[in-house]
């Protein structure tokens, strides 16, 4: 048992909370079911890095000999590359489950390259989002067969990537369309990242990969949304029916997913969708103060969401977002109105006093949330 647990058991025994026999049974149980937790992260990192280097080495070898291979040899090698990683993962599943999961993940990643290389070999008509769809289907098949977190992570990433790919291709097919005239994509990214990030806890829910994916995607998605909302709102150059369908999917798909995962608690996701749409409407006023205030309100809302549902990671992300809003407001609205010395002094005080107050408040909120859990 870890030393801290031994100390806790000794303290509980001395206080009379546990008797000596119960404490001995706890020690015996933990000794019989102990796992080398201190090796888990090093093993996972080593496995992931090794699988990445293995895949990179194979791809480098193939690329250096690609021109010398015939189309039949290229196609055969593509099939073999996907099969070899999955077969190796299956053979190592019993003795090395972490290595097995890494090899299966590399096999699924290699599937994406195989899809596009196969299309190039046989000169298939170009529709690159279709390749993303086939890749996503392969990831979902991998998750249904293996039930591994890496497969679910890839499937949850590739499925919305296919939808975004179809939408961007529809935009680029029309003359004069530009990537900046697209508020649909950042709205869909933010709402889906929030739906992933706010997955409920429970043993029946495979929430870990989705929460990690949502947390990783949430920050760049919000940055993308902030860049779009910083300029006057411009609609994509598509027909009205296509635009209505795109908005319905961008807003409706994350809300449907949240409703299936969170059930009656999904009303918070609906509130977040209303906040995002209101942000786009407020961008038409071109008021920096109003936009910063709305972003600060959204950050506080995420913090309150975390306190309400006892999720400390939402408190952390909300506090980070609030601090970023304050810094951007200082740089854009305050710093240019002061002299160089005064602006640097104010910046230092903002970092020291504001950072201390924000961290203290964050710790209190985290302590409150953890107290509710217990």
Image (cartoon, rainbow, N blue to C red):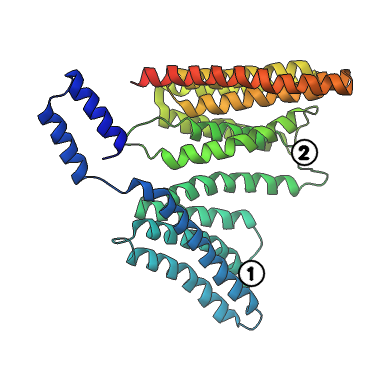
Task: Tell me the quarter of the picture where residue 13 sits.
Answer: top left
Q: Which mark is residue 120?
A: 1
Q: Which mark is residue 235?
A: none
Residue positioned 25% across, 34% down in the render: 6
Residue 260 vs residue 17, the one in the foreground = 17
Separation of marks 2 and 1 at Cα, in angstroms: 30 Å
Task: Tell me the quarter of the picture where residue 177 sits.
Answer: top right
The percent coordinates of residue 162 (x first, y second) are: 58, 48
Count of all numbered marks drawn on residues in the image: 2
Q: Secondary structure at mark 1?
A: helix
Task: From the viewer's perspective, tell me whether residue 280 is left or right of residue 34.
Answer: right
Task: Tell me the quarter of the picture where residue 99 sits.
Answer: bottom left
Q: Secondary structure at mark 2?
A: loop
Residue 279 vs residue 91, the one in the foreground = 91
The percent coordinates of residue 25 (x first, y second) are: 13, 35
Task: From the viewer's perspective, tell me whether residue 81 is left or right of residue 27.
Answer: right
Task: From the viewer's perspective, tell me whether residue 87 is left or right of residue 283.
Answer: left
The percent coordinates of residue 287 (x first, y second) are: 80, 18
> Is the residue 265 above or below the residue 56 in the image?
above
Residue positioned 52% across, 76% down in the render: 77
Residue positioned 18% across, 20% down in the render: 17
Residue 122 appearing in the image: no
**Image quadrant containing the N terminus:** top left
Residue positioned 63% across, 80% down in the render: 65
In primary-sequence order, the first of circles 2 and 1 is 1
Tell me the residue that label 2 is attached to. 180
Residue 164 appearing in the image: yes
């Amino acid at each position: 048992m870890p030393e801290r647990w031994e100390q806790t058991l000794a303290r509980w025994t001395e206080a009379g909370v546990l008797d000596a026999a119960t404490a001995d049974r706890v020690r015996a149980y933990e000794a019989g079911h102990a796992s080398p937790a201190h090796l888990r992260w090093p093993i996972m990192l080593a496995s992931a890095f090794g699988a990445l280097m293995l895949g990179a080495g194979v791809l480098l070898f193939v690329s250096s000999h690609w021109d010398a291979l015939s189309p039949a040899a290229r196609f055969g090698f593509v099939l073999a590359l996907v099969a070899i990683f999955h077969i190796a993962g299956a053979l190592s599943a019993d003795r090395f489950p972490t290595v097995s999961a890494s090899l299966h993940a590399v096999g699924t990643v290699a599937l994406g390259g195989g899809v596009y290389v196969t299309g190039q070999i046989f000169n298939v008509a170009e529709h690159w989002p279709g390749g993303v769809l086939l890749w996503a289907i392969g990831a979902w098949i991998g998750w249904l067969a293996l039930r591994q977190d890496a497969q679910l992570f890839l499937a949850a990433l590739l499925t919305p990537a296919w939808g975004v790919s179809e939408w961007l291709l529809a935009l680029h097919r029309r003359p004069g369309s530009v990537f900046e005239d697209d508020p649909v994509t950042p709205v869909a990214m933010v709402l889906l990242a929030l739906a992933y990030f706010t997955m409920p806890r429970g043993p029946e829910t495979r929430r870990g990969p989705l929460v990690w994916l949502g947390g990783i995607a949430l920050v760049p998605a919000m940055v993308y949304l902030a860049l779009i909302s910083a300029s006057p709102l411009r609609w994509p150059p598509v027909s009205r029916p296509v635009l209505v369908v795109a908005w319905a999917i961008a807003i409706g798909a994350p809300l449907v997913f949240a409703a299936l995962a969170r059930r009656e608690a999904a009303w918070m996701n609906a509130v977040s969708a209303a906040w995002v749409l209101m942000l786009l409407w407020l961008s038409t006023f071109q008021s920096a103060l109003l936009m910063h205030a709305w972003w600060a309100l959204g950050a506080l809302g995420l913090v309150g969401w975390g306190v309400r549902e006892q999720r400390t990671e939402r408190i952390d992300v909300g506090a980070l977002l609030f601090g970023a809003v304050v810094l951007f407001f200082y740089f854009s609205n305050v710093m240019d109105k002061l002299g160089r010395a005064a602006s640097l002094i104010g910046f230092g005080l903002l970092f020291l006093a504001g950072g201390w107050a924000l961290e203290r408040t964050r710790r209190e909120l985290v302590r409150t949330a953890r107290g509710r859990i217990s």
